[in-house]
Image: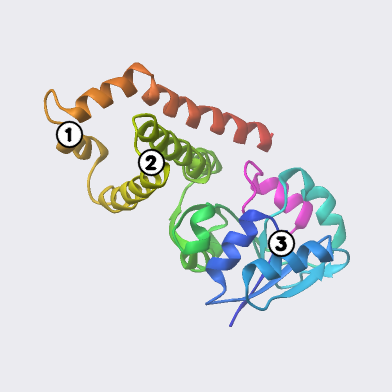
Amino acid sequence: MQTITFIGNGNMALSIAKGLHEKYNIEVVGRDQNKLDDFANNLGFHIDTYLLKDFDITNKTILLCVKPNNIEEVSKLLHGKADLLISVLAGTNIASIKKHLKPKFVVRSMPNLAASIGQSMTTLTGDEAAKDKAIAILNSIGKTLWLNSEKEIDIATALAGSGPAYLALIAEALADGAVKQGLKRKDAMHVMRGLFEGFGTLIQEIHPSLLKDSVMSPGGTTAAGYGALEDGNVRASCIDAIEEAYKKAKELSS
């Protein structure tokens, strides 16, 4: 099997490694051996681990998972020229990656935490020559979409990359609402999880507006609750969340 080399051992790296391990050999490079050991233990299967200093990346396929502000420091500790570098660094542009690490090809990507269960929605852009290889790798952790510009991937990062946090907030709030009205917490959580599981399937085939209209009968319970969401500016807040996350991505890239 092909080997994928992770530079960095944070939560995103862990999620992606869990999704890739059935099709690829995994090796992980980091600063701290204790943290690398914890990473390997959390994965639950064998991986090779290496310390960052003086690690040779020549001809390797790299998944870069360090913090964006650490890229210059990390680049000084590595040797060689990678064949393909796939970055998951939010807001870190391709020019900066090429400047510091000088791989043959660079692809920017933005998976999300659902990579660990093979359900990530990953967007990509970068060197066209590496497009097919990068998509093949990241298809192992879910769905992929190749975009035509870095601006588009920064917008998509605000949606799919940050989206799990937004949906988690909504899920928690809905369950809290049910508890407030008298449903037991355990039961509220069970119902909420079933709701999201079913909705996740429906939204693949039905436009959101049609799905909403199919549930909302005139003068009914859904209409009453929906009105409360509109009164609370939930729609506007969701739009604003994407805008603010996109602004942050642009700020990081500059």
Q: Which residues are magenta?
A: 88-103
Q: Is residue 135 left or right of residue 68?
A: left
Q: Which residue is mark 1?
A: 213
Q: Which residue is mark 3?
A: 103
Type of amino acid under label 3? Pro
Q: Which residue is mark 2?
A: 184
Q: Position of residue 93 (x, y in %)?
A: 65, 44
Q: Which class describes the residues within 10 Å of circle 3: few (<14), some (14-19), or many (20+)? A: many
Q: Earlier in the sequence, mark 3 or mark 2?
A: 3
Quick one: SS at disc 1? Answer: helix
Q: Position of residue 172 (x, y in %)?
A: 45, 38
Circle count: 3
* Quadrant placement of the C terminus: top right
Q: Earlier in the sequence, mark 2 or mark 1?
A: 2
Q: Position of residue 117 (x, y in %)?
A: 48, 63
Which is closer to the viewer, label 3 or label 2? 2
Type of amino acid under label 1? Asp
Depth check, front residue: 58 or 242: 242
**In the rendered structure, does residue 81 fall within the stretch colored magenta?**
no
- For residue 86, say whether it is visible: no
